[in-house]
Image: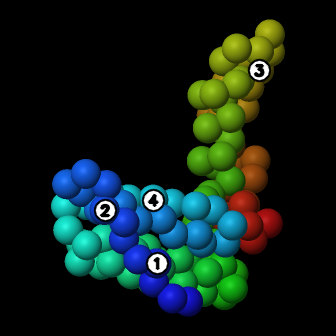
């Protein structure tokens, strides 16, 4: 992929880059800074693409997901008391599954 050329706007330089159908732009003081910023964004996009290709998924335990559900939604429900009661014996009920990543279950 070719690097786009920076455009001068007033006393600053402006550059746009299209990555995977999404446009990102940046404004810098010099043309060289623009080119360096775009090169860095392109490298980050390649690394992210490689990580997606390798199917590297973040570790997110089932227990953490359940706590997040309670914090964001469970407290507002009519059965919030029941949901809170389920949090305490979570490790006993689910055992090994509680600490497994949700992607592995």
Earlier sequence position, callout 3 versus callout 4: 4
Mark 4 vs mark 2: in front: 2
Quarter in which the C terminus is drawn:
bottom right
Residue at x 25% of width, y 51% of height: 10
For disc 1, the marked residue is 4
* Front-most of residues 44 and 25: 25
Task: Please tell me whether mark 1 or mark 2 is closer to you in this view.
Answer: 2
78 displayed left or right of 98: right
| Residue at the extreme top | 78
**Looking at the image, residue 94 lies above or below residue 17:** above
Observer-side mark, 3 or 2, equals: 2
Query: Can you tell which mark lies on residue 25?
Result: 4
If you read the primary sequence from the N terminus, does the residue marked by circle 4 or circle 1 appear first?
Answer: 1
The answer to whether residue 94 of the structure is visible from this angle is yes
- Taking the image as shown, residue 15 lies to the left or right of residue 69, namely left
Q: Nearer the viewer, mark 3 or mark 4?
A: 4
Snapshot quadrant of residue 61: bottom right
Q: Secondary structure at mark 4?
A: strand
Residue at 70% across, 14% down: 76
- Foreground mark, 3 or 1, reads 1
């Amino acid at each position: 992929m070719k690097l786009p050329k920076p455009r001068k706007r007033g006393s600053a330089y402006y550059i746009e880059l299209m990555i995977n159908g999404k446009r990102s732009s940046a404004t810098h003081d010099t043309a060289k800074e623009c080119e360096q910023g775009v090169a860095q964004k392109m490298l980050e996009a390649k690394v992210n693409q490689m990580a997606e290709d390798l199917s590297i998924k973040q570790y997110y335990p089932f227990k953490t997901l359940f706590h997040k559900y309670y914090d964001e939604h469970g407290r507002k429900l009519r059965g919030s008391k029941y949901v809170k009661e389920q949090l305490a014996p979570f490790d006993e009920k689910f055992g090994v599954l509680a600490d497994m990543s949700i992607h592995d279950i």
